[in-house]
Amino acid sequence: MDDRAARLRQARLAAGFDTAAAAAEAHGWNRNTYASNENGNAPYSWRRSREYAAAFGVRPEWLYDAQSPQTGPQMGPLSGSQTGPAPIIGRVGADPGGEVLLAGGQAPPEFAPLPPGGTERAVALRVTGHSMRGLADDGALIYFEDQRTPPSPDMLGQVVVVELETGEVLVKRLLRGAAPGRYDLESVAGPTRRDARLRWAAHITAIVPPWQARRILIQGD
């Protein structure tokens, strides 16, 4: 069992779950996936570590790579304001469709300072390539709150981050679709996707230009 898997097991036991199956059932996780994450057969990503950390009341930085203490003032369910950095969870802009390529669990994580008003749910995307020119240039950072809530009326006409029912995560301009619960997704440079069903949508809270992004990136271990 590797160190990351061992920390996950430690967090699960400390949270009062005697077995991996009990924890998975309580939180609606796939039992096989969680068991593989905990026994080290399938290393979990930074994004997944945030979910596990929130469930078990520990810091995701500690769970993922032991960057911060497990116990002390930072321990407990994540709520309120955050003083730590925001994780960079993926890349966007390598193709004109605005698709987000989420980071896996193999490479060291990257972080960036919180934007003004950022909370414990703040995350960032790194722009790769030039297909998002006019919104964000190559190397820029796009921040949003990873809140997983349905689209709200004030998002219409805005460029937002969305997840489709297919699991795709995209950066698109949100427009009304042809029927209730459907949305047109307009790309910065590519074709518009019509009448999509969404799992969630999130406002972009800040865009940091490339020259500044290079100065503020924090490389994890």
Image: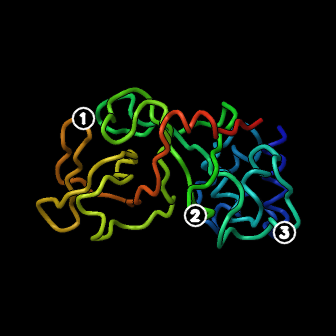
Q: Which circle's residue, 3 or 1, is located before the other in the chain?
A: 3
Please tell me whether mark 3 or mark 2 is closer to you in this view: 3
Please tell me whether mark 1 or mark 2 is closer to you in this view: 1
Q: Are marks 3 and 2 in contact (CB under 8 Å)?
A: no
Residue sitting at x 84%, y 47%:
6
Residue sitting at x 59%, y 58%:
29
Residue 189, numbered label: 1
Amino acid beneath label 3: Pro
Q: Position of residue 170 (x, y in %)?
A: 36, 45
Q: Which circle's residue, 3 or 2, is located before the other in the chain?
A: 2
Residue 21 relative to residue 212: left or right: right
Q: State how far apart marks 1 and 2 are (Cα).
A: 38 Å
Q: State how far apart marks 3 and 2 are (Cα).
A: 28 Å
Q: Position of residue 37 (x, y in %)?
A: 70, 45
Q: State how far apart marks 3 and 1 are (Cα).
A: 45 Å
Q: Are marks 3 and 1 in contact (CB under 8 Å)?
A: no
Residue sitting at x 23%, y 66%:
181
- The residue furthest left is 178
Residue 28, numbered label: 2
Q: Which residue is mark 3?
A: 73
* Of 116 and 46, the residue lying toward us: 116
* Residue 32 in sight here: no
Amino acid beneath label 1: Ala
Q: Secondary structure at mark 2?
A: loop
Q: Which circle's residue, 1 or 2, is located before the other in the chain?
A: 2
* Residue 6 in sight here: yes
* Of 188 and 166, the residue lying toward us: 188
| Dot 2 crowding, Cα within 10 Å, few <14, some 14–19, many 20+ | few
